[in-house]
Image: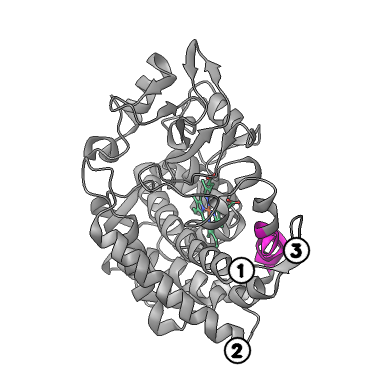
Amino acid sequence: MYSPFSRAVFDDPYPVYRRLRDEAPVYRDPEDRWWVLSRFDDVAAALRDSSLYSSSRGPAPENPDRDGKKYSIISMDSPRHEHVRGALKRSFTPAAVAAMEDALRTIVHGHLDKLRPGMTIDAMEAFAFPIPTDVIGELLGVPASDREQLRVWWEAFLAREEGSVAMPQAAIDASREISSYIGGLIEERRRDPGDDLISRVLGATFEDPDSGERSLTPHEVLMFCNLLSAAGSETTQKLISNGLVALHDHPDQWQAIVDDRDLIPAAVNEALRFDTPSHWVARTLTAPVEMHGVQMEAGDWVLLLLGSANRDERRYSDPDRFVVDRGKGGIDVYFGWGIHVCLGQWLARREAQLVFEYFAEHFPRYTVGRHERVLTATVRGYTTVEMTLR
Ligand code: HEM
């Protein structure tokens, strides 16, 4: 019924997700590789229980990690996770993002000011790819001329071949290129520190229970910066474009935003729920668990389907409709939840809000033409979106 790597699931996963929730809330992969949880309550409970649902083997069963060797904090458990995440957590709070407002506006407007009503563009090339890439590039201190190359490497790193779980050679090559490039930047910043995130990670210290106060090892610094450069752009590109396509498909909701810009923060949250960029996260069990009459064993992989939880009719009324203002009520899991909740969530939200604001003001009657999805390991979004600006 369900494989995260099939083209059919990528084209339209939502009918499959509904069947999983209704018929097999604890679903065993037909090839016996992992369990799949798809109901909101089960996914949220698993995200919260990080001692039972461990992250230490990483986010990708096809390429497992060991305590953050490959993917930094996303594959660490407590207490190491808090130590390393602590190095940067203050750099991503709502207040820290508010302090970046001018820089964010300059980047967003820099790309959108080049566009004019009447133009037909590929929205991905024109702004959805470059805005998040420039934002994280700016924060990490990546020179502007190298940012597009980094984005292309990350895209190759995440791309998967249909039906295949293994990482393609191009993805492995891209990961080496990224590490070597970021490693070079770290060396430069070690010699000549600035106010960028790399310098802050290099300068951070914490109390290690084994060895007392220490800074991050060179490998820890490299993996953390790698993670930021990937996590910071790929998903946000998808949020911006998935959101604009969804709003085009729900003209009454878009009109409500054009009439009342105060709805934009809620609309960005709804875009995250309605067509979420991150469709699943992975965990391994540290002890046996019985759920809905099914027994899972210690060491088993479990995929937590955020994309399905976000459309669970047990949690959201009329879940397959984009409803700009759903009001407040309970938690959402599109950025994960618990100790691993997305570090960049406020930054990602603000980038998308600035794009939606610009569109509401300058292109309130934009239309969407041909659009094509991209097949990646966990991220759902487009590779091209033809858009006519009006
Ligand atoms: C729409 C955009 C984004 C989405 C949908 C998203 C989604 C997620 C999700 C679901 C997780 C949890 C992973 C897990 O539980 O295993 C996560 C973690 C993370 N995200 Fe994001 N993310 C976005 C943007 C960003 C940005 C802009 C940054 C950085 C600038 C970022 C940095 C991170 C980091 C460092 C983690 C790991 C946190 C930890 O393990 O403690 N993300 N993100």
What amino acid is at disc 1?
Answer: Thr
Which residue matches tag 2? 191
Q: Is residue 140 above or below residue 22?
A: below
- On whether ligand 1 comes within 8 Å of the CB at mark 3, the answer is no
Asked if residue 233 can be seen in this view, the reply is yes
| Quadrant position of the C terminus in the picture | bottom left
Q: Is residue 36 within the magenta segment?
A: no
Q: Is residue 301 above or below residue 229?
A: above
Q: What's drawn in magenta, residue-wise?
A: 84-98
The x and y percentages for residue 185 are 50, 81
The x and y percentages for residue 164 are 23, 43
**Residue beneath the point at 38% across and 14% down:** 23
Q: Secondary structure at mark 2?
A: helix
User: Which one is in front, 202 or 155?
Assistant: 202
What amino acid is at disc 2?
Answer: Arg
The x and y percentages for residue 318 are 47, 26
Of badges 1 and 3, the one in the foreground is 1
Give the class, few, some or many, for how many residues have Cα within 10 Å of label 3's Cα (few <14, many ≥20). Answer: some
Which residue matches tag 3? 206
Q: Is residue 89 within the magenta segment?
A: yes
Relative side of 227 to 363, left or right: right
- Answer with mark 2 or mark 1, whichever residue precedes in sequence: 2
Label placed on residue 217: 1
- The part of the image, by quadrant, that contains residue 77 is top right
How far apart are labels 2 and 1 at the CA level? 16 Å
- The part of the image, by quadrant, that contains residue 195 is bottom right
Relative side of 88 to 374, left or right: right
